Amino acid sequence: MSQDATKLIHHPYRAPGGFEAVVPGVHKASTVIFENTAALKTRQWKDKSGYTYGLHGTPTTFTLEERLATLEGGLQTLLAPSGLSALALVNMGVLRAGDEVLLPDNVYAPNKDFVRVELAHWGISHRFYDPLDAAGLASLIGERTRLMWLEAAGSVTLEFPDLIGLLQVARQHPKVITALDNTWGGGLAFDAFDLGLPAKGDSKGVDLTVHALTKYPSGGGDVLMGSVTTRDERLHQQLKMTHMRLGLGVGANDVELVLRGLPGMPLRYAAHDAGTRRIAQWWAKRAEVASVLHPALPDSPGHAHWAQSCSGAAGLVSVVFDEAQYSSERVEAFVDALKLFKIGYSWGGPMSLVMPYGLQGMRQFGALGGKKDGTLVRFAIGLENVDDLLADLDQALRVLA
Ligand SMILES: *Cc1c(COP(=O)(O)O)cnc(C)c1O
């Protein structure tokens, strides 16, 4: 009996190498075996020349990292267990006690929360800036400013920032690292490392990007993962050490799902984009809404900046209901009346989603035409037939009447 157990663990059979399939294999490990103590002492993982421990990388994670670096236009990528943990990794890897971090007013709210609460505990201060006011940014950058977040388009309200203008100001301060949350653009709408700016090191754009792979790279609504991509080797190694010390790991089965989702991502992105533009244009003709927020619409905040660097757009559109006419209760009744649009956080999967937000207290700067009240509803457009989605919106709007 015990003899069988040993044989089952130390089995002599080795499958032949050279197996080549369309998709890469899925390798799982905590322990990685060294053939002898010399290998133990010499094997390197930081340059991806070898394997030492599951957390330090497997053929599966290295493969996804390399493909994401290509998608983002970077050179190196690190994987994290969620988009939010990738944002936290950058904050913790770059900032030290006494430093200051700048965030756009419309930054992904959990990043705002991380900075306000967790980083404050470590003696790191923060300031918010207006993403549409590049000139105003200059006066906010000081001696202690070390990190500046950018997001294009911003979360929920979808203003497209003056990316080029903001980067021109920030890049006059070599100590300031510019970090873009690139989830919306997905590496497809624009090239974050080549925005046509003069080269700073190896980049003609930002210093690093973060991508919530949870969204379009997965595309299934069934994976949580994030990534950090750089072009600068020193910055990459700095973040990699923080990544290692924090013990951030991702499961091989989740990596497999993202690897499977990636090849179809450009086609899905284009389909989400086309459907969303139709729906945004439909909303623009409806009297119920005071504004429709989608960077490709000429009236949407930051449209000119979007047009400067993008052709594509993600599948998100927000509408602001006329507050004088429609109370939040009535807007919520409209949301509840939707049948195909399901109420839920996140986006990027096949199913269309809807989420209401109260505007009060949401923004410091007047990007929404100074509007501070009322209800905003964000739609994440999935891959359903667009006519069916429009019919669903139309029937639900009848409860508003
Ligand atoms: C969803 C999202 C994240 C966080 O991703 P999770 O995997 O859900 O943690 C970060 N930034 C943006 C812009 C997002 O939309």
Image (cartoon, rainbow, N blue to C red):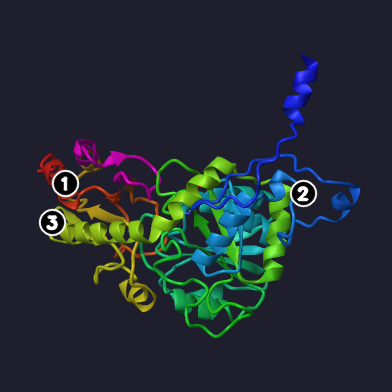
Residue under label 2: 52
Image position, residue 365 (x, y; %): 40, 64
Numbered mark located on residue 388 in the image: 1
Among the two numbered marks 1 and 3 on one chain, the one whose residue lies closer to the N terminus? 3
- At mark 1, the secondary structure is helix
Image position, residue 28 (x, y; %): 64, 41
Among the two numbered marks 3 and 2 on one chain, the one whose residue lies closer to the N terminus? 2
- At mark 2, the secondary structure is loop
Name the kind of residue labelled 1 in the image.
Asp
Q: Residue at x 82, y 46 (%)?
A: 34
Q: Residue at x 38, y 50 (%)?
A: 348
Among the two numbered marks 1 and 2 on one chain, the one whose residue lies closer to the N terminus? 2
Per the rendered image, the range of residues in magenta is 332-356
- Work out which residue is located at the far right of the displayed protein and give it: 37
Residue 157 in which image quadrant: bottom left
Q: Is residue 119 left or right of residue 381?
A: right
Residue under label 3: 286
State how far apart marks 3 and 2 are (Cα): 59 Å
Residue nearest the viewer, comparing 328 with 167 = 167
Q: Residue at x 29, y 39 (%)?
A: 342
Name the kind of residue labelled 3 in the image.
Arg
